[in-house]
Image (spheres, grey):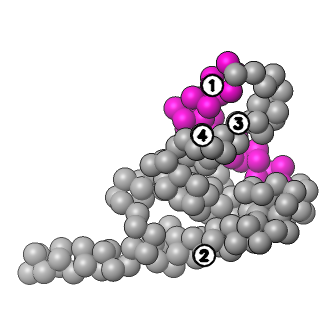
Amino acid sequence: MRFITIFLLLLNFTFANSLNLTKTDLVILNKIKSLTDEPIMKYSLMAIAIKESSVGKNIANFSSNDFGLFQSNIKTVLSRQYINDTPANRKYFALKLINDVGFATANAIIELEYWRSVHKDNWVKIWSSYNTGFSYKSDTGYLYAKSILEIIKKLKNEYKL
């Protein structure tokens, strides 16, 4: 009987895992969820971590210069930290984004809060701008925001996060 129950639970998880999240991914997402009290920020951070880095599996994009769990752009991070944009500073802060999850999370929140003030709590525009900056009206920005919303729906409904 116990074997059947375990088998059914595993089968259910396998077929209800449209985002292909591992048990480790779920632990990380629950940790991200615990970092803020605001539901929209919790879900935004979790969805961005999934979309941008596959929950930490892809933490460096050298072609776009985006790094860490939330793929923060190095030029933006340096600017928001009031740090000179030099090769040494780029390397140091890229490694910090990769190795310091707290720093990466803080930068993602700062970025979301910046766009939140620009877009007056319009989360579709906020998510779009997270990816495309002031080109949030572009197809790329729209599709990015749409994918974040879809991930959030799955996190709530399928994964019960």
Q: Nearer the viewer, mark 1 or mark 2?
A: 1
Distance between the Cα atoms at labels 4 and 1?
A: 11 Å
**Residue at the spot of label 3:** 74
* Most foreground residue, 144 or 123: 144
Mark 2 or 3 closer to N-term?
3
Q: Residue furthest front?
A: 63
Distance between the Cα atoms at labels 3 and 4?
A: 10 Å
Q: Is 111 colored magenta in this rendering?
A: yes
Label 2 secondary element: helix
Question: Which region is colored magenta?
Answer: 88-115
Number of numbered callouts drawn:
4
* Most foreground residue, 44 or 88: 88
**Residue at the spot of label 4:** 62
Q: Residue at x 81, y 22 (%)?
A: 84
Residue 18 pos. (x, y %): 43, 75
**Quadrant into which the N terminus falls:** bottom left
Disc ID at residue 115: none
Q: Is residue 123 visible?
A: no
**Residue at the spot of label 2:** 150
- Give yes or no for contact between labels 1 and 2 (Cβ–Cβ under 8 Å): no
Q: Nearer the viewer, mark 3 or mark 4?
A: 4
Q: Nearer the viewer, mark 2 or mark 3?
A: 3
Mark 3 or 1 closer to N-term?
3
**11 shown above or below 95:** below
**Residue at the spot of label 1:** 91
Residue 20 pos. (x, y %): 40, 67
Distance between the Cα atoms at labels 3 and 1?
A: 9 Å
Mark 1 or 2 closer to N-term?
1
Residue 155 pos. (x, y %): 52, 70
**82 shown above or below 32:** above
Q: Residue at x 39, y 73 (%)?
A: 17
